Image: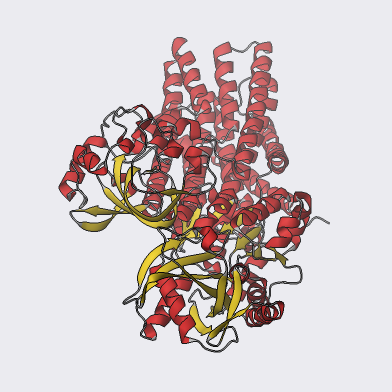
Amino acid sequence: MARRSVPPPSAHPDAEWSRPAEAVLAALGASRDGLSPSAAAERLRRTGPNIVRDEGHQGVLGLALRQVQNPLVLILVFAALIAGVMQEWLEAAIILSIVLGSSALGFTQEYRASNAVAQLRQRLSLMAKVRRGGQALAVPFSEIVPGDIVLLSAGAIVPADAIVLEAQDLLVSEAALTGESFPVEKRPGLAAADAPLAERTNMVFLGASVRSGMAEVLVIRTGQATQYGAIAERLKTKPVETDFARGVRQFGGLLIRVMVAVVIFVLVVNQLLGRPFIESLLFAVALGVGLSPELLPAIISVTLAAGARDLAKRGVLVRQLDAIENLGGMTVFCTDKTGTLTEGQIVLEAATDPQGQASPEVARLAFLNAAFETGIANPLDEALMAAGAAAGLDTAGWLKVDEIPYDFTRKRLTIVVQAPAAPQARLLITKGAFSNVLDLCVTWRDGDRETPLTAAARTRLEAYFQARGEEGFRVLALATRSMEVRPDYVLADESEMCFQGFLVFMDPPKPEAAAAIAALAALGVSVKVLSGDNRHVVGHVARSLGLDTDTLLTGAQVAALKDEALWNLAQRTTVFAEVDPQQKERIVRALQRMGHCVGYLGDGINDAPSLFTADVGVSVEGAVDVARQSADVVLTRRDLGVLRDGVVGGRRTFANTLKYICITTSANFGNMVSMALAAPFLPFLPMAASQILLNNFLSDLPSIAISTDAVEASQLGSAQRLGVADIRRFMIVFGLVSSAFDLLTFAVLLRLFRAHEATFQTAWFVVSLLTELAVVMVLRTRLPAWRSRPGTLLAATTAGVAILAMATPYLGKLSALFGLTPLSAALMATLVAIVLAYIAATEAVKLWFFRPQT
């Protein structure tokens, strides 16, 4: 789809932020009622989708190019070119056919995997509320066009660069663009034509997140034409390399070193023996290629995509495929309590005066505060609204004048209202965390009068707060202040207030949460609670679920700790209370510093930094946009049981990927070492280059099905890591077992059957292929092979290729094409006996290799 080339805003001569909104609307051919659906569709066709860069989905051409960009494929193509130059046309054709076959196999599997991932990402795509034709509609970000009227609210991500038309207490975080770490207020108005980004207070930019308030904005630029798009290359950072990705990279380096050594050794030895150079070169190249699992990229893509599809069925939606490996490797999971450990259905248990008696006046003031709030939606306000509606309360006659939005430092919200009977006075109603509100107060409500807040009165209030918290109730405080009429009200006005009473909420623990925590512990994943709630409530919930609260740390204690002290305390502490967003992120980093793979569950605006920092950011489908966008994994429901399924699914995916790596490299290593050792002592090559490549291609076919294989419970019980040293040990031990039987096969062929070149190569082709297939069945499990049932597809493809391996020498012209010849019944029976002996020996070595370590 063609895109219209638009210069970046900083270079645009119109500078829309310096022009009246109505003029910009007219220039864009738009109105405050929004574009019509047909006009929006036409603009989308002209401007292209609102995308800065694709999130990893590759088209047909991209996937095809990926196959031929594989270094191993390029090596084979080079070998085919050499054969062609030397007019070895048959050899060149065979090599190219196998290259095309392997590439087609990899392309087919990766194409299916890519489509599966694209479907999952479509399900998780962000939606924006847009006014079109006078109606508010939910529209995918990618379909936003210049001229659209977008409705923003707290928690939303800004979908494009836009001019603010209307705003109410709009605070926006745009640190990625301006470097300003604190939210900035945005209002309608004008800015200078040469104003830098930070001073364009009448504009919002793609990628910024709304911290509080609401607004209507006019989209002026989308996609690459936005400020974010113009500096995307500067902002683009290399993704953090996961343990699995690092292991694969190191493993690839190991194989390349071994492959180069084998190729040079074989080529030099064959030249010293006076064999034809081209034949020796092709043999050496085929031998080196045969050592490498060239389908590894496809296998990883297929296995991860299969894992993502399976997890989606269980309610775990994966945004980043690499996160599956980290999900399986998670050792610590950090979560808030609300909705995860508790029911999440918060109800107002009581609205009381300072003495703890039910107070209709406190309930009314709290209702007004919640009803007029335009900032961050939260279940506490929903509970207040529900209780007010049940009591017959409404806002009739009351007028909202101003709002001082909630933030995570003050932990309170203030609404300024005009009472029906007092048009010349203003009433500030503040609700929030108990201590944060109490610190503002100089008086307290004692019946019908205000009384100075003495130390004794403060002590009584704190005692009531603590007592209700220890009973499991969440308690907020409510305070008021009467003030004169002003144009606006600021933070400094939150002072000299009167403490009106308490708001007592109940959110009981989930009955199934304790079982889910125990299930995660059985998988080696410890659950830690990171909550902003007060220590008494958090401690009560944690204790009721069997969590250790003896080492509970508060936010104040965390703030007083040096990094080194926190590193040690973090892993020994289960419950953190009264922590702010920055402290949550610091705790996550401390756990990572001690070697843990950390998961973090969050659904709010303040959770985004921790979600991004964690090894596995986990959110829920109902979370605010910025939280879902920062997460690697999204749960369809906020349930630790679903997360437990995700951990098991991640470990299953990891185990099957590791199976392919270990099994294929050990089998290939054994065969290649055998041929490299035997080549100098044989009057001919043990296998022709085309036979090696065909053997390698056929042995890889069952590996495509390995993503569907069953995994033992023992492999799911703890996190696993991809260690190059462990793979190297596995490859050498089981590869040398294979080599021992290869050498036995050579001796039998030469001494007992006096095999000539064609018979030797054919017999060796059959037995090496059969041993590679057999080892898949043996080494896919740590249990005895007969006690572990493989996946149906893996078993079927393995059996099918085994039958084909034994039939290949008898396929007439096709056999002759590869230099294969029919084998006698006695020889075939002997080869089968060798394979059976190899299976028995491998089982015995496996028992030793996986023995419990003392």
Image quarter where the N terminus lies is top left
Q: In this view, does 850 lie to the left or right of 184?
A: right
Residue 375 place in picture, x, y as percent: 43, 61
Q: In this view, does 735 lie to the left or right of 201?
A: right
From the viewer's perspective, is residue 365 above or below residue 414? below
Pick the front one: 536 or 298: 536
Residue 422 place in picture, x, y as percent: 37, 75
Displayed quadrant of residue 332: bottom right
Pick the front one: 122 or 778: 122
Residue 655 is at least partly visible in this image: no
Residue 73 is at least partly visible in this image: yes
- Extreme-right residue of the structure: 854
Pick the front one: 311 or 670: 311
Q: In this view, does 632 lie to the left or right of 848?
A: left
Colouring used for the render: secondary structure
Residue 169 place in picture, x, y as percent: 41, 56
Residue drawn 59% across and 37% down?
Answer: 768
Image quarter where the C terminus lies is bottom right
Pick the front one: 537 or 333: 537
From the viewer's perspective, is residue 183 above or below residue 759? below
Residue drawn 59% across and 56% down?
Answer: 581
Number of marks in picture: 0
Residue drawn 63% across and 57% down?
Answer: 584
Residue 231 place in picture, x, y as percent: 44, 32
